[in-house]
Each structure stands twice: as structure tokens, then as C-alpha cells.
Amino acid sequence: MKWFVEKPASVRLSRRALLKIFGISIAAIAVGAYKITDLFAHRNKYIKMRQKGQYKDDERVRKVYKLAASHQNPMIKRFYDEFAIQPFGEVSEELLHTTYFKRTGGF
Amino acid sequence: MSLCIKGGEGLVEKIRTFPPSPVNEKLKTYRKGELAGIVRVSDRCVGCDTCRTQCPTGAMMGEIGTRHKIDYDRCINCGQCLINCPFGAIEQMSFLDEVMKKLEDKNSFVVAIVAPAVRVALAEEFGKPPGTLTVSRLHLALKKAGFHIFENNFAADQTIMEEGTELIGRIAYWELGLKEIEFEIKDIRPISWVKKVKLDLKEFENKPLPQFTSCCPAWVRYAEVYYPEILPHLSSCKSPQQMAGPTAKTYGALKVWKVNPERIYTVGIMPCTAKIYEASRPEFDSAWRWLKEKGLVTTKFKDVDAVLTTRDLAELFRRKGINPIEFSENEKPENFEWYSGGGTIFGTSGGVMEAALRFAWSVLSGQEPPALSEKWNFVKVRGYTHPRVEAKITIPLKSELKKEIGLDEVTLNVCVVNGIGYRGLHIKDVLEEVLAGTSKYHFIEVMTCPGGCLNGGGQPVEPMGTSWIDPVLPLPL
Ligand code: SF4
Ligand code: SF4
Ligand code: SF4
């Protein structure tokens, strides 16, 4: 999982650099350095847990309400029947679609 | 060691906020009225440089040991710096006070547009582990606080209807050389429902392949600032939040809730800091334009009036003494609370792609398997922890389309960019290939945040409070 293993800040930070930065207690610095190293390893874990939750919700609405795909949503059917008529119809073009802008920053 | 600063009862970090205000700089990449400086570095920065290594654009600047600074012209407001700062030194712009006031105002009909990823992270602010689902209890808690519900997952389903149709249109025009196409969107349960779609493909002349997703406002801004030539490739679909706002103020106001559209105040509740910026884009007043044309309103208003992050919402609940965990998780949805599995997986990397594939596959093949069937799962496109995923998806065509198109099946080449990466690391090749005309893909999903919105810049900051070394607090050891 190369993705998250950016070089931990603690590797790049020498203890001296840290001292220079903080000028507070060495103990506090040690805690801070531990924290930074830990950050990315930990990040993987909570992202995975949230991902599980998201797919659990997918399974839940499929199991309880039998809704796997967007066009099966009863309120979507109502929205197009009563109001928007069809995707890419006039109402959709006015309310649901947009355009983009070139932004020149000079970089 | 319990050294953490408690957000609520949870062990998440408390992020400082500041009220919306313009930045004191002349900016080149923002238009009039757009909010810049959604996140800012405070003087509590110790110069550890972690944020800079997480920044997708190079907007975060500074040397080790010096206070870092954001170049707002380069910044895309993703908030990755904020959630990764080990010292809680980055602050977020917050509309919380304004929203609290609106909730007290009896004349306002306050609508919460709740994003997919909020439901898998909010509980962390109330002492539960990451991934704990809060759906109907979140709705009930929001209602208790005075909101009406508009599921952004419903808007995600709208997005798929529009964006999936757009993809079919682009492929029909560019790959199959058709001038128009007709197809049916069908569902057989609980009763047969058919939507006939007819597309005049002339307008697709300006919509080339591959098509990129457009639901991540930080990615849209990235394209606008760094790769403007790519813009015709972006889906013309607004993001779910920006579909939800105008739908609530038109269809919702007139046909569902039956209230005066001018009373509706829409609040995006998002895992995301870029959504705060997105809502401020000047073209996002489409409901007002639409209603004005029909003589129904006069005073100008935005499609989305305010945006709260997941953290802001937790703070709102705390201020009101509401604990969402305590409500029932078994309430049946009504109106805009309905959503599909495809809608909810928008919160995770690969989710928009999978939802679009569920739609396109069903429409093109004519198949409608039971909801729990494996056939709806396109596991190959899930981002999980891969920076980039690609897949080939072959869809057999139903007989009407076989005749119309003259092919037995179509094969879609798709790609999922899971986090733009440090200075565009995960996306640069993909974009360069498209610009060189050598891209093999039909459809590309881009999420700025690694893992998708569930790891967005507005989410609870895990783990173990990172602001241990906080000058305003006594040192822990
Ligand atoms: S991560 Fe936080 S403390 Fe470290 S340089 Fe960035 S803003 Fe400063
Ligand atoms: S990480 Fe995102 S929000 Fe932070 S400076 Fe970079 S682009 Fe801006
Ligand atoms: S990936 Fe999601 S949370 Fe991150 S910037 Fe994009 S929309 Fe916001």
C-alpha cells in the first residue's frame, strides 16, 4: 500500500530540527513525533472502516428496500414523472447541468 | 494515556473554525462572490511540513520549521492539509452560526442536504468507531434540530440518471457515430416503470470522450485552474449538492412540501470543505432564475444557501443537546429521504463509477436482477486503497439496441482516480493522455481526497486528537 506511506514527517525531521521548531519540552516533542509517524498508518485503518460502513449501507438499502441502482429509487421515478420528464430534458438542462470556467492563475 | 482533546464524547480532534469572511488578498483564480480561503493556517503552526506533503496542488508552502502559508490562487479547498495536520493548526470557515439563527427563524423552511459520507463518520464525534452507520437516526436528529430532509443520496441518484445518460450519449455519438439515440430506462419492481429517453446527439459534438465525473468541486477547480483544456471532457452534470439545492427550491417547494420557494433555506451537510466554496459559485442560482422566469419569485437567492461540514453538524448537535446515536435506526424513508445503493456509495472512491455502471449496464442490457444479486456489484472499480484503478466492463446489448446500433455488446474502459495525489501524482498521466488523444478510457472518476469523500476535509479528524501539543492547553507530560 504505497499510497499512504508517504515519508513520515518524523523521518524528515531531525530531532534538532524539532528542537529548533518548538522550543518547548523534549517530552512534548517526542509525543509529537510519535504522533506524526503514526498518522499515516492509522489513516489507512479509519478509511477502511468508513468504506466498510458505506458498502454496508449499500447492502442495507438493497436488502430492506430492494434498491440497487439509481433508477429504481421511487422518488426518482416521481421526480421524472411529475417534473423533469426525462434526463437531459429541458428542466434538467436548466436546473441540473452547468458549465465550467477557465481560471488563469499564471502557473 | 488519555491525552486527547475531546470533540464531543469521541476521541476526535476539535478543529477551530472562523465565520465566513473574504480574504485580504487580490486573487486571480476566483470570480466575484466566490469564497476563497475556506481553510487557513493559524499561528499555532509549528512548521512540521506534514500538510505540504498532502497537498494536491502545491498551494501549501513553507519550509520545515517555519509557519506555513496557503497560496489561495493555487488552492482547491480540499482540506486535506487540515485533516492531516498533527497539530490542529489549520482552521475551517464555518456557517454554523448563520444556520443556527435560521433554525430559530419560524419563517424559514430549513432543508438539510445530507451527503453520503456523513453517515459513516458523524458517529465518531459521539464516541463510536469509524464506519458506524447513522441513517434514520441522523434524519431524526436533524428533524429534532428543526431541519427538513433532502438526502444528498437522492441527488446522487439524480446525478446518475443525468450523468449515465450523458455517458451513453457521448459513446453513441463518438464511438457509434449515431445522430440520435432512443432508449428506455426501466424498472420492473414493484410495478413496471418505463422512462423513454430520446437524445438529439448534436450537442454531444462538444462533449468528447472520455467523460470525467464532476461531482468533486475540488477536482473541478483543479481542472479549471491547471488543465482548462480538459473542461469539455467534464460531465456537464452539477454535483449532487448543486442538484439538490435547485430541486428542493423548485420541485420540492412546488410539488412536494408545498411551501413558498423563497422561504426555503438549503444547507449542504458535507464531508468536504470544497463544497463551501462550490455553493458560492455565482452560476449556482439556477432555481431563482427558473422560478423568476415563471414569475414565481423576485428576490435573488442561491441554490445552496450554506454548507456545514460533518464536524460543524456535530457541533450543532452538541450545542442543541442532541445525540444522534440515541435515535431509532429503523424509520422508513419518505419523500427525498429515499435513495438507492448506487446513491450511497458515492461517498467512497469508485462509488460514482459503480453507480453509473449499475445504471448503464441495466439500461443497455435490459437486465433487472434482484437487488442483492452480485450482478449489481462492480467490485473491479472500487478504489479501496489503490491510487488508481482501471477496468474493462463488457455489457451485452438488449435486442432492441442490438438492432438500433448493430452490435452485440459494448465494452467500457473505465478508470478511477483515488485521490489527486501530491502535486497531481495520481492524475497527471491520465490527463496528459487525454490531451494527447491517446487515452483509452470512456469514463474517468476523480475524487480529490484519497479514499473518496469519506476521507474529505470536512470529516471528523481521526485518530487520537492530534493537537496534543497545543499552546493554549497545558502540556500533556
Ligand atoms: S501540518 Fe500543521 S503544524 Fe505542520 S506545517 Fe502544516 S499547518 Fe503547520
Ligand atoms: S491541501 Fe487542499 S486545501 Fe490545503 S492548501 Fe492544498 S489544495 Fe488547499
Ligand atoms: S473527494 Fe469528496 S470530500 Fe474530497 S474534495 Fe472532492 S467532493 Fe470534497
Image (tube, coloured by chain):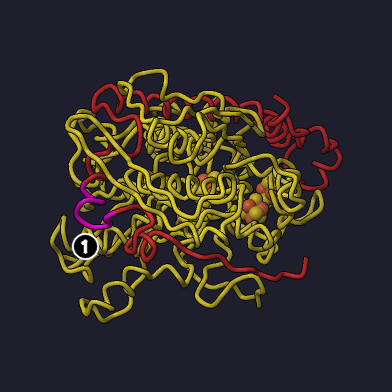
Chain colours: A red, B yellow
Can residue B365 be seen from the camera position used here?
yes
- Image quarter hosting the N terminus of chain B: top right
Q: Secondary structure at mark 1?
A: helix
The percent coordinates of residue B316 (x first, y second) are 33, 50
Which quadrant of the view contains residue B358?
Answer: top left
Q: Residue furthest left?
A: B258
Occupied quadrant, residue B228: bottom right
Residue A81 counted in the magenta span = yes
Locate residue B30 relative to residue B98 in the image: left or right. Answer: right
- The residue that appears at 76% across and 44% down in the rendered structure is B429
Viewport quadrant of the C terminus of chain B: top right
- Against A44, is B210 above or below? below
Q: Which residues are magenta?
A: A78-85
- Residue B93 placement (x, y as % from top left): 50, 60
Amino acid type at image mark 1: Glu
Q: Quickly name the residue at label 1.
A: B104
Residue at (26% x, 63% y) in the render = B249
Judging from the image, mark 1 belongs to the subunit labelled: B
B165 relative to B103, above or below: above
Residue B351 point in image, percent of width and height: 48, 35
Q: Residue at x 25, y 35 (%)?
A: B137
